[in-house]
Image (cartoon, rainbow, N blue to C red):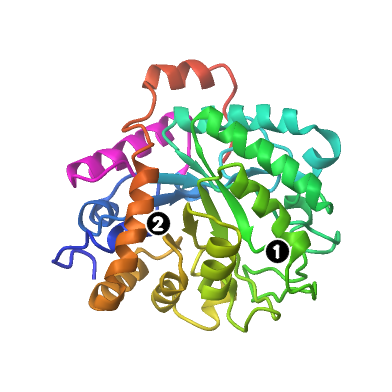
Amino acid sequence: MAGHGGDWGSVGPLFMVGIPGPRVDRGVQQLVRDLRVGGIILFARNLERPEQVWELTRDLQQEALAAGDPPLLIAVDQEGGAVQRLKKPFTRIPAARELGTGSTPEEVAALSRTVARELALVGINMNLAPVLDVARKPEGPQWGRSYSSDPEQVAAFGEAAIRGYLEGGVIPVAKHFPGLGDTMVDSHQVLPAAQDPDPERTTDLLPFRRAVAAGVPAIMTAHLRVPAWEVQTATLSSVALKDWLRRRLGFNGVIITDDLEMGAVAGAATAPAAACQAFAAGADLLLICGQGEAAWEAADLLSRDRAWQQAAALSRGRLQCLRERIPRGPADLDQVKAYFGGRGQGDH
């Protein structure tokens, strides 16, 4: 599918994709110039030294500019603890649970500001954080990634992190709606079901309500089945995305899916099929982290269905507003060298 002719501008911007290595190769160039994807997500396989990250993001943005598109969303999972893609010489971020027990919201805001400034220096403009899951039990998969078992505390720390990231010049993404805190299995492997019988999900939705009120620009979905709502996973559910997140919580920003190649989804649908289902359910930005070919296939499926054109235009509009906030290029390379030069290099 790569290199396929035709105008992909109507559907390509709805995708955020992973890329294979630390440089822009021909396949990556086709994703940006030809498919015209809206974003790139970076993992350890893409990240070496700060200067290399700067060069990679610069080259990616140059490809978007050559296609006549606004700046790409370039995202990373820089949460802290076990989920921190950029390690030394970038600032170490404690796990959320550690921050929740040993820090104040003001300290979390300051730390988030520093993290954002470092990401912005190397051209990363979106952090897939903070996690707003209210993890109940230490044996649950989200325990270390959750600020607290108290929804009020999660909300306060989440608001602080969102404020810090925005002040530091990076787009925060609150996750994982409608909350993975009451699950006992990992959605990377299998589809979890919510354990809390409350159909209103009062505990789990409180941090998201507060994040929406605080102006969070983007929210990531959870691969989670809420039996009180419906049988479908939230990522693919119009009940979760259109009824709850859009209508009841009043969220008008960008809805991003979690990775559509994760085990929780892959057991029931291919990534291209899941992308179509997620878009029909109300998602704006479709995340495919591993296989670029899957993004081409999904875009081909979406482009064939004229019934989705109006929804695609709405999603593109929301994404356009977000992308127009992004600086065209990263900071000057000399600034990157000056900031990170004395901090010591480490393994990624």
Visible in this render: residue 149? yes
Name the amino acid type tagged 2. Met
208 lies above or below 347:
below
- Residue farthest toward the left in the current orientation of the protein: 5
Q: Position of residue 236 (x, y in %)?
A: 51, 74
Q: Main secondary structure of the magenta part?
A: helix
Residue at position x 34%, y 67% in the image: 311
| 130 sits to left or right of 99 | left
- Judge the density around disc 1: few (<14), some (14-19), many (≥20) Cα neighbours within 10 Å: many
Residue picked out by circle 2: 16
Q: Which residues are magenta?
A: 47-72
Visible in this render: residue 237? no
Q: Quadrant of residue 123?
A: top left
Residue picked out by circle 1: 180
Q: Is residue 101 magenta?
A: no
Give the spatial CA distance, label 2 vs label 1. Answer: 22 Å
Q: Position of residue 322 (x, y in %)?
A: 40, 44
Please tell me which residue lies in front, 165 or 28: 165
Q: How many numbered discs, if any?
A: 2
Q: For the residues carrying marks 2 and 1, which lies nearer the camera in this image? A: 1
User: Which element type, helix, strand or loop, lies under badge 2?
Assistant: strand
| 71 sits to left or right of 84 | left
Residue at position x 64%, y 69% in the image: 187
Residue at position x 37%, y 29% in the image: 330
Residue at position x 77%, y 56% in the image: 134
Sequence-earlier tag: 2 or 1: 2
User: Where is the N terminus found, in terms of image quarters?
Assistant: bottom left
